[in-house]
Amino acid sequence: MSDLNNVTALVTGANRGIGRAIVDALLARGATKVYATARDVDTLAGLAADPRLVVLRLDITDADEVAAAVAAAGDVTLLVNNGGSLAFGDLLAADLTGIRSDLSTNYLGTLAVTRAFVPVLRNNGGGAIVNLLSLVALGAVRGMGGYSVSKAAAASMTQAVRAQVADLGITVHGVFPGAVDTDMIKAFEMPKTGAPEVAQAILDGVEAGEEDIFPDAMARAGRKVWRDDPKALERQMAAI
Ligand SMILES: NC(=O)c1ccc[n+]([C@@H]2O[C@H](COP(=O)([O-])OP(=O)(O)OC[C@H]3O[C@@H](n4cnc5c(N)ncnc54)[C@H](OP(=O)(O)O)[C@@H]3O)[C@@H](O)[C@H]2O)c1
């Protein structure tokens, strides 16, 4: 998708963090319409008033809400699968509830929304799907074991779906951020990139046709290590 001007987009988890920044950035780039979706539509009240914004309720783990979103947003050409969860804990000791929840949201929820919207994009002559993954998909972090697994699953899904929809004129972009300054990792004292900067880099990557987008300095440093020596990235991430 070489130009996001005049795109009609749907963003999941648009009420805060990276999702909200992507909505703002899409509007600034001249999107025709942006469906800003959230589990609780009241949390979208803080978005800038703009006639191009359409607010929708969407919990990506709820099949009925996914179907309702498709029915309401049949003109979408850009799907941004941003909504995600992070349950801290290691794989050997953490309660399985959080491990299941991250898998259910980050992998199965993202897959459900993708499956539902591929026919919409196809009917609209093609488009793009953007999946918010994470650097942890390429090198697991012990204290985020279940989250790492869920993002690795979503990364593999991204590849499989990319191959399946290539003939439909749909591009699929995986995004591998490092540390971004949002609620998700607010407990961590470490250098973080602001969500607005990350959102711009993601959209730049989509416009440039990049399949794998590394939208911040930590992500780009990780990409270099990963390209040179994937085992080095594994060790680096395991040391966090
Ligand atoms: N922050 C980072 O360092 C970082 C790094 C790599 C990747 N990411 C990824 O970037 C994406 C955005 O994260 P963020 O940093 O902006 O985190 P955030 O501020 O915690 O926001 C997470 C968003 O996901 C939504 N969400 C959670 N479960 C959902 C569900 N079942 N259905 C729909 N929406 C749901 C949340 O909605 P509620 O407000 O209703 O909870 C919220 O809007 C996530 O996929 C995350 O894994 C973040």
Image: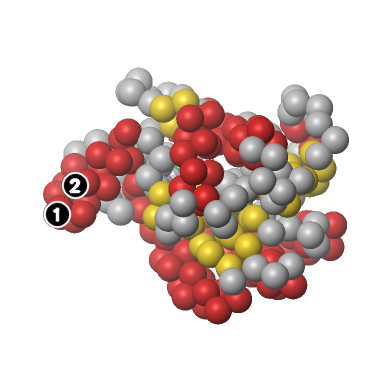
Q: Quadrant of ligand 1?
A: top right
Task: Classify 10 Å Cα crowding around label 2: few (below 14), some (14-19), many (20 and above).
Answer: some
Residue ID at (79%, 59%): 75
Q: Where is residue 191 in the image (x, y as percent from the top left)?
A: 33, 23
Q: Which of the two residues, 166 or 233, is positioned nearer the viewer here?
A: 166
Residue at which label 2 appears: 225
Q: Where is residue 233 in the image (x, y as percent from the top left)?
A: 20, 48
The amino acid type, in three-letter code, at marker 2 is Val
Instruction: Determine the secondary structure under disc 1.
Output: loop
Q: Where is residue 225 in the image (x, y as percent from the top left)?
A: 19, 47
Label 1 C-beta lies within 8 Å of the nearest ligand 1 atom: no
Q: Can residue 103 be seen in this view?
A: no
Against 14, is 181 above or below? Answer: above
Q: Which of the two residues, 147 or 112, is positioned nearer the viewer here?
A: 112
Instruction: Determine the secondary structure under disc 2.
Output: helix
Against 7, is 121 above or below? Answer: below
Q: In the rendered view of the protein, which quadrant contains the C terminus?
A: top left
Q: Where is residue 18 in the image (x, y as percent from the top left)?
A: 55, 36
Residue at which label 1 appears: 229
Q: Is residue 190 visible?
A: yes
Q: As drawn, is 69 to the left or to the right of 191?
A: right
Q: Distance between the residues labelled 2 and 1?
A: 6 Å
The amino acid type, in three-letter code, at marker 1 is Asp
